[in-house]
Image (cartoon, rainbow, N blue to C red):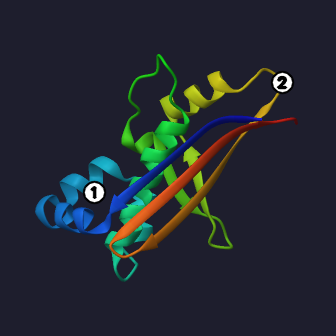
Amino acid sequence: MIIGIGTDFCDIRRIEKTIEKFDDRFLDRIFTKAERAYCDTKSGRASYYAKRFAAKEAAAKALSGPKTGHLRWQDVEVKNDPSGRPVIYLHRAAKERLDSLTPHGMNAHIQLSLSDDYPYAQAFVITEAVAP
């Protein structure tokens, strides 16, 4: 059963300019240490940051409801599994929100798809409740 859907589109050039202007102040505020460690090893790192930025926005949309507030940026974290597939991990308020949206007796699952074609990055998130 689908709980929520979210998508976001991000201009990689905007992320590049923001990194140039604010560097660590921006990166430390938005991204976790693990996300930074991953993105900073990549050539064209701005596209990796842009995809993660879009994923955080898409996840917030998928977790939103009529009375939900904002989430902290670092409550949504994007990592990669051993095959390279992007995976979302929720922390603190984001995890609590997903738990509150998940019907009793079901398990929450998050699907994430990331894509980029310079100068754009896109993320699509589906939150779902599945039987154990």
Residue 28 at x, y percent in the picture: 28, 52
| Residue type at the position of mark 1 | Leu
Residue 48's place in the image compared with 107, above or below, is: below
**Residue with the most extreme left position:** 21
Residue 127 at x, y percent in the picture: 65, 40
Q: Mark 2 points at which residue?
A: 105
Circle 1 crowding by C-alpha within 10 Å: few under 14, some 14–19, many from 20:
some
Give whichever of 51, 73 is nearer the camera. Answer: 51
Q: In which quarter of the image is residue 39?
A: bottom left
Q: In this view, does 1 lie to the left or right of 8?
A: right
Circle 2 crowding by C-alpha within 10 Å: few under 14, some 14–19, many from 20:
few
Give whichever of 111, 88 is nearer the camera. Answer: 111
For the C terminus, give its image quadrant: top right
Q: Name the residue under label 1.
A: 27
Q: In which quarter of the image is residue 20?
A: bottom left
Find numbered disc 2 in the image and state the secondary structure of the residue it sits on: loop
Q: Which comes before the other along the chain, label 2 or label 1?
A: 1
Residue for point 70% across, 27% down: 102
Residue 54 at x, y percent in the picture: 42, 54
Residue 56's place in the image compared with 22, above or below, is: above
